[in-house]
Amino acid sequence: MAIHSKMKAGVAAVLLLVGLSACSNMSTRDRNTAIGAGVGGVAGSVLTDGSAIGTIGGAVVGGVIGNQTSK
């Protein structure tokens, strides 16, 4: 895996954490959905070597999983 791809994943993870810190009034389900989408997007990006389709697909799948774990 290229350094550039790892760097993008790291930056995305940091941005996700900073963004979520501002969302303290979110419900547990909303927070889990956002976390799942972020983690899924980073994982999809890493696994597909930075492909936009992989990132979006990973975010969608992660968001759905995060949403459903809160039921």
Image: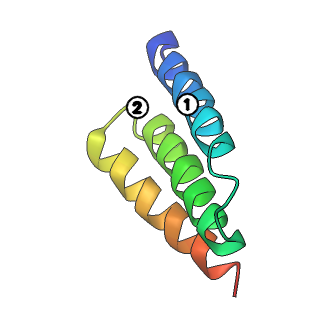
Q: Quadrant of residue 16?
A: top right
Residue at screen point 67% across, 71% down: 27
- Indicate the position of residue 68 as horizontal and vertical percent values: 61, 81
- Indicate the position of residue 64 as horizontal and vertical percent values: 51, 73
The residue at the far bottom in this view is 71
Residue at screen point 48% across, 15% down: 2
Residue 30 vertical placement versus 16 (above, below): below
Label 1 sits on a secondary structure element that is helix
Classify 10 Å Cα crowding around label 1: few (below 14), some (14-19), many (20 and above): few
Which quadrant would the C terminus be assigned to in this image?
A: bottom right
Q: Which of 60 and 54 is in front in this view?
A: 60
Query: Which mark is in front, 1 or 2?
Result: 1
Mark number displayed over residue 55: none
Q: Which of 31 and 5 is in front in this view?
A: 31
Mark closer to the chain start, 1 or 2: 1
Residue at screen point 34% across, 52% down: 56
- Indicate the position of residue 13 as horizontal and vertical percent values: 60, 33
Residue wearing tag 1:
15
User: What amino acid does circle 1 point to?
Assistant: Leu
- Indicate the position of residue 34 as horizontal and vertical percent values: 56, 58
The residue at the far top in this view is 3
Residue wearing tag 2:
49
